[in-house]
Amino acid sequence: MTATHETVLLEEAVAALNIEPSGVYVDGTYGRGGHTNVILQALSPQGKVVAIDKDKEALQFAQTHHQQDQRFYSWHGSFGDFSAALEAAGIEQTIQGLLLDLGVSSPQLDNAERGFSFMRDGELDMRMDTSQGLTARAWLAQATEADIADVLWRYGEERFSRRIARNIVASRAEKPLATTLELAELVAQSVPKREQGKHPATRSFQAIRIKINQELDDVEKCLHQATARLASGGRLVVISFHSLEDRIVKHYMRAQSTPPRLPKGLPIMDSAVQSAMPLRLVGKAIRAQTNEVAHNVRARSAIMRVAEKV
């Protein structure tokens, strides 16, 4: 059965990009191409979409569906290196839009062999790019108890991180964790208090996945390049699915759009300070509407922020 993916905030994200028909747009997380498809529909023959994904399965899907479209270019790698993707595509000029739809996709979750889901039994992999890097299984087999606890707390905000880490290390002394359900069961047994409506392994799986894929590092790396690569009037649109991602995005956009507080009496016009800021915020943070959440539960935690290059 082919895994499907419901693109979250599809219409809202593409509208936020404020598409110029001849513009260049980067879809930093292609997935199954939901956003890219709609962007391409709005572009003229002179427009371009550079689609990036760590997941080779996503890019195979992309090449099958867009191989005849000269406006489309796909690149295997991290959106944190999107400048390299633009270089590979032969694009030297600034771009009109950069879109990031963060997190794990439905096809990745639905394929038990990928190891992302605590609801399906599969090998503990969790790599978005299966061609490189440590698997979750390998990392859990060699990381120290302190490192595991730190990752669970820092990336999962797991209250019982130390207890879980201690039990992982004790368990692997007899037999290393090999499958998702083994890890999920161990975490469930380690958590004395449950959050209503949430599987006890949710935070731990999120934390380990973020660690394995360096997800937050990628977000920061991408944002630090974004302002320089956007053209005047170009839009940065980011959809986050948990507070750690959103905090990074919110702080970056705020820092790039808010003038510093200067001592009173300095001979500097407010307009001069404001004009020196590279971004301006576009509207307030947007969440999925009730009808979308009812249709796609993944949209429940989505939050989208938009900024424009001044």
Image: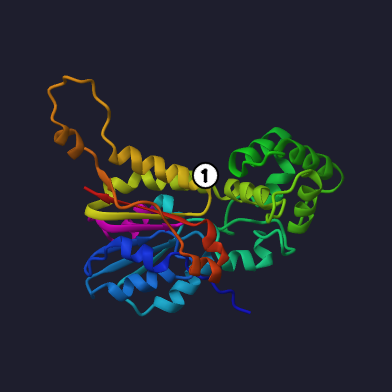
The residue sitting at the right extreme is: 174
Give the secondary structure at mark 1. helix
Quadrant including the N terminus = bottom right
* Residue in view at x 12 percent, y 22 percent: 267
Q: Is residue 242 left or right of residue 199?
A: left
Counting from the top left corner in percent of width and height, residue 250 is at 40, 44
* Residue in view at x 34 percent, y 59 percent: 88
The residue stretch that appears in magenta = 82-101
Q: Is residue 291 visible?
A: yes
Q: Which residue is mark 1?
A: 244
Q: Residues within 10 Å of mark 1 (few under 14, many from 20)?
A: some
Q: Is residue 89 visible?
A: no
Q: From the viewer's perspective, is residue 58 above or below residue 69?
A: above
Q: Is residue 176 left or right of residue 37?
A: right
Counting from the top left corner in percent of width and height, residue 275 is at 18, 39
Q: Quadrant of residue 162?
A: top right
The magenta stretch spans residue 93: yes
Q: Is residue 271 left or right of residue 224?
A: left
Counting from the top left corner in percent of width and height, residue 203 is at 65, 48
* Residue in view at x 26 percent, y 46 percent: 280
The magenta stretch spans residue 78: no
